[in-house]
């Protein structure tokens, strides 16, 4: 069995925007092993969500995709695929706001049963049973009763569980998660993360989890990719990235949120705000906000360079990180 | 002498559903108690954090203090003067608020200057010929360039809008500034500068800051004292350092355990707090946290604990909060 | 502009709310708005300059030259009383266009104001206004017009009054819904916290942000009012003869469709042209404000 499940090489997405075209995702490469969880971190406008959606072919109309996307539907090596090959078969997605992602005119049980009915040709009764079983699987109390409810009758946490059950109903190999816990309360987020971790280990599923919250990604993912202004600026194993970030943006992201565990005197934060995709700065796109920026940062061609077997960075001045451990 | 800001037994209820229907069915009209008897005091320059999850009543508490929602019972005093739901313009001015969502908190059809100068004129904060100058000063106060005054909110980034929201609140020179989830909708990289701004404004202007958030870490950063709310009640009221070092209420402990932390991997199926909060319309008997509480005992279902403790800012509403250490946790 | 509106990129959740008050908002309008404006402007010019352009007095009867075919003297021929159809068409614009515009504008103003008040103040004010709207909507429109015409006499005044009484309901409903959407926005709450008076909040912070829907609907309603006027005149409830009016002209020309087809057809096409221009404006505004 080939170890790789998904390979994305040099992904570039262009979108029309008021007469001009913008390139919100610009040369992203990722790879994902079977059973692995990859976290993509970034702020709004970093292109993380578009990257995720391009994998399952859910881009907005007018979007133009270049690059090489490969997915392993069977045990072989990943091969190029069309979105229709993986819909309902290999890849599922869950979103941030379940209320808009769940059809409000369908009962919860029917929503979950829809996938198996279409893709496996299950009868009504069998599909309903599968739905209840899935609901129990994702920790929804009283699933028989709740299967007859409408999405709006459920709390945010339960709706997110319903969405997870819907995603699992087609037995995917890869679950794409687009900030699924951002709209939830801390204690519910905690439950959902625990659930995802549990599902992942028992079903051997791979996960790509997109979030702006590094700490959330760290709870679930073995590997991280940090995105800024349409590019992956750093990748590496979670622990390594946390203990010694190799890109100033990663470091800034980690120090700009108040830490839960320690009192900090003054947060560093990042000056300015993320650049407009209509006018990305030349060279390193983070340079205008970077506190280590030097003159050559604006000139150097962006490249993601390996620093060790498992890590790479887009920063050309990694010497500022040398010998530093957090 | 009484405290600067005094909130006593504050209760806010909302009518839900039809009162007529309830009367026909011979039941009392259905009221939802969003804030249930909250009491605390604050001094000038204090920074109080209010923490809780959605539905705990923290935003309603903020709105009751600003006068946006009527108070069902209890009292509010600022500087000895009662804060009524219908208050005079001059009193209204003293408590201002920064809102959560920067995309809907600014009137899209007014330039920033028009918005600010309207407030300055209506409240006669400065003489008419000084209004333009004052607008510029306000922008400097929130660390924005003056040329943004001529711009409508649609042209601003989220962080800039939130700063404008702060400038709007400060235009009225309030005594109390309430920030309701003021950074929750912002990108992580721009949250810190806004938090730093709030901190420095409080110090420089001597504001009493009430920072409302679901995020314990953020509250820890800006507040000297934290009130934790659960289903309309304050369950713990402590100084920030004490709360984080030694939380006494099991709900506070659960919230802390649930918060994601760097470098801690989630165990499969693990969660700090099981289930979801019950509906505020059907509260459990006794302590309202007891159905989800890991240390609940029989007394918890029978009697609701009071918010008490050794001092006014060392209070917790748990029967076991101040027992000697060694209580199961 | 020093800072770009970063929120406008696809990944950001905020939706930019377009307002006509914004500088440059008109520049973003699609071409069809300008085409529509051109057409409507042409009609307005014709109405204004009718006495100059028209070759004949629209009321001058020429019994010797009844139902003449188009020729160089009478571009569109003459009607059954020998009046020049072309001149009558031009003069009719002076009747139809003001009535159409006023007949839509007055209910738009009334309805927008009532809808805003109902939505913002709520409670019994809302109930009173919206129940009145229900009653008006349930009342058969033609009966109301007939009653008004009998009470006030035939003429422009009755027609405009009838339109106002009937058509405000739609605006009230649209605007009430919009106000309910905007009323709980944080910026309205902020204005309340700042101690601003209710009427001021309504005028400065609510009204400008709900008015777009009226602007989008108004051009379509002018089309409707013009068509309705034509229909009423066709039925003899509109503008009394001999004043030239497009709907009445269609009615007059109808018996002669076989022999003088242009008599009834050309006024019809004139109405269609105006309708097209106004519809283009309405549609374009909707697209431009949504973007």
Image: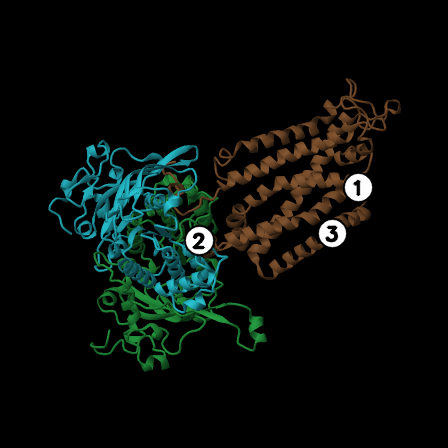
For the rendered model, the colour scheme is by chain
Dot 1: what SS?
Answer: loop
Which residue is depicted at the point 55% across and 55% down?
C120
The residue labelled by disc 1 is C235
Would you call the spot at circle 1 few (<14 residues within 10 Å), some (14-19), or many (20 or more)? few
Residue A118 has which mark?
A: 2
Instruction: Say if labels 3 and 1 share a chain.
Output: yes
Q: Is residue A192 left or right of residue C36?
A: left
Residue C140 has which mark?
A: 3
The foreground one among A113 and A185 is A113
Per the model, the C-alpha gap separating discs 3 and 2 is 50 Å
Instruction: Say if labels 3 and 2 share a chain.
Output: no
Of circles 2 and 1, the one toward us is 2
Q: Is residue A213 above or below residue B267?
A: above
Instruction: Say if labels 2 and 1 share a chain.
Output: no
Dot 3: what SS?
Answer: loop
The answer to the question of whether label 3 and label 1 lie on touching residues, with beta carbons closer than 8 A, is: no
Which residue reaches farthest right?
C64
In which chain is the residue bearing label 2?
A: A
> Residue A198 placed where, x, y %?
28, 61
| Residue C144 visible here | yes
Per the model, the C-alpha gap separating discs 3 and 1 is 16 Å
Would you call the spot at circle 2 few (<14 residues within 10 Å), some (14-19), or many (20 or more)? few
């Amino acid at each position: 069995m080939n170890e790789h499940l998904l390979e994305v090489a040099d992904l570039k997405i262009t979108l029309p925007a008021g007469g001009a075209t913008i390139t919100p995702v610009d040369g992203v490469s990722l790879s994902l092993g079977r059973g692995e969880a990859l976290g993509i971190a970034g702020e709004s406008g970093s292109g993380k969500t578009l990257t995720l959606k391009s994998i399952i072919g859910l881009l907005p109309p007018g979007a133009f995709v270049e690059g090489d996307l490969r997915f392993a539907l069977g045990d072989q090596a990943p091969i190029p695929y069309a979105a229709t090959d993986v819909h309902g078969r290999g890849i599922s997605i869950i979103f941030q706001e379940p209320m808009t992602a769940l059809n409000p005119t369908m009962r919860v049980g029917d929503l979950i049963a829809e996938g198996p009915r279409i893709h496996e040709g299950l009868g009504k009764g069998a599909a309903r049973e599968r739905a209840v079983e899935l609901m129990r699987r994702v920790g929804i109390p009283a699933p028989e009763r709740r299967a007859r409810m409408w999405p709006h009758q459920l709390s945010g946490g339960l709706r997110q569980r319903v969405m997870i059950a819907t995603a699992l109903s087609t037995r995917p190999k890869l679950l794409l998660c687009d900030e699924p816990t951002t709209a939830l309360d801390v204690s519910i987020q905690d439950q959902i993360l625990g659930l995802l971790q549990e599902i992942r280990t028992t079903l051997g599923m791979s996960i790509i989890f997109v979030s702006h919250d590094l700490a959330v990604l760290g709870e679930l993912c073995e590997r991280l990719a940090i995105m800024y202004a349409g590019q992956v600026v750093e990748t590496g194993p979670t622990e390594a990235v946390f203990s010694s970030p190799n890109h100033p943006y990663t470091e800034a992201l980690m120090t700009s949120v108040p830490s839960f565990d320690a009192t900090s005197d003054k947060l560093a934060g990042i000056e300015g705000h993320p650049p407009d995709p209509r006018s990305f700065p030349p060279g390193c796109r983070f340079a205008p906000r970077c506190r280590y920026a030097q003159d050559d940062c604006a000139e150097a061609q962006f490249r993601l360079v390996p620093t060790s077997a498992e890590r790479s960075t887009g920063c050309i001045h990694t010497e500022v990180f040398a010998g530093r451990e957090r | 002498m009484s405290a600067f800001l005094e909130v006593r037994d504050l209760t806010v209820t909302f009518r839900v559903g039809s009162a007529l229907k309830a009367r026909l069915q011979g039941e009392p009209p259905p009221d939802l108690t969003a804030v249930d008897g909250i009491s605390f005091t604050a001094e000038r320059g204090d920074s109080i954090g209010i923490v809780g999850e959605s539905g705990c009543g923290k935003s309603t508490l903020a709105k009751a203090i600003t006068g946006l929602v009527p108070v069902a019972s209890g009292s509010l005093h600022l500087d000895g003067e009662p804060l009524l739901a219908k208050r005079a313009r001059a009193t209204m001015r003293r408590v201002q608020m920064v809102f959560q969502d920067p995309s809907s908190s600014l009137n899209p059809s007014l330039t920033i200057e028009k918005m600010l100068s309207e407030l300055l004129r209506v409240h006669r904060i400065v003489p008419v010929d000084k209004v333009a100058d004052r607008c510029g000063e306000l922008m400097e106060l929130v660390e924005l360039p003056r040329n943004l005054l001529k711009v409508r909110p649609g042209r601003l980034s989220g962080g800039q809008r939130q700063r404008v929201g702060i400038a709007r609140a400060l235009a009225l020179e309030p005594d109390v500034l309430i920030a309701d989830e003021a950074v929750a909708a912002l990108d992580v990289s721009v949250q810190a500068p806004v938090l730093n701004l709030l901190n420095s404004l409080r110090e420089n202007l001597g504001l009493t800051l009430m920072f409302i958030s679901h995020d314990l870490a953020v509250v820890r950063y800006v507040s000297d004292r934290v009130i934790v709310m659960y289903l309309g009640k304050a369950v713990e009221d402590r100084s920030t350092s004490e709360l984080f070092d030694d939380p006494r209420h099991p709900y506070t402990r659960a919230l802390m355990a649930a918060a994601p932390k760097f470098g801690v991997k989630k165990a499969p199926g693990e969660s700090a707090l099981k289930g979801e909060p019950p509906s505020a319309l059907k509260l459990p008997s006794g302590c309202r946290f007891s159905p989800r509480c890991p240390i609940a005992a029989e007394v918890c279902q029978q009697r609701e604990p009071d918010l008490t403790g050794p001092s006014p800012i060392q209070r917790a509403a748990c029967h076991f909060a101040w027992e000697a250490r060694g209580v199961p946790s | 502009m020093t800072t770009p509106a970063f929120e406008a990129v696809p990944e950001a959740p905020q939706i930019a709310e377009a307002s006509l008050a914004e500088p440059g908002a008109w520049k973003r309008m699609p071409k069809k708005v300008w085409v529509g404006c051109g057409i409507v402007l042409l009609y307005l010019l014709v109405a204004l300059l009718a006495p100059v352009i028209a070759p004949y007095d629209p009321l001058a009867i020429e019994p010797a030259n009844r139902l003449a075919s188009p020729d160089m003297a009478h571009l569109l021929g003459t009607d059954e009383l020998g009046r020049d159809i072309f001149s009558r068409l031009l003069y009719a614009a002076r009747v139809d266009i003001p009535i159409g515009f006023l007949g839509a504008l007055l209910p738009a103003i009334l309805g927008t104001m009532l809808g805003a008040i109902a939505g913002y103040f709520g409670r019994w004010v809302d109930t009173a206004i919206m129940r009145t709207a229900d009653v008006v909507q349930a009342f058969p429109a033609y009966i109301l017009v007939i009653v008004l015409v009998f009470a006030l006499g035939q003429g422009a005044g009755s027609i405009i009054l009838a339109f106002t009484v009937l058509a405000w309901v739609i605006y009230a409903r649209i605007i009430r819904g919009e106000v309910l959407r905007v009323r709980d926005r944080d910026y309205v709450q902020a204005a309340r916290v700042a101690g601003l008076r209710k009427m001021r909040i309504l005028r400065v912070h609510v009204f400008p942000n709900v008015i777009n829907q009226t602007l989008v609907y108004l051009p379509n309603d002018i089309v409707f009012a013009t068509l309705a006027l034509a229909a009423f005149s066709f039925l003899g409830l509109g503008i009394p003869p001999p004043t030239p009016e497009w709907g009445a002209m269609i009615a007059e020309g109808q018996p002669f469709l076989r022999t003088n087809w242009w008599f009834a057809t050309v006024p019809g096409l004139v109405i269609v042209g105006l309708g097209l221009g106004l519809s283009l404006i309405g549609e374009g505004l909707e697209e431009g404000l949504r973007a």
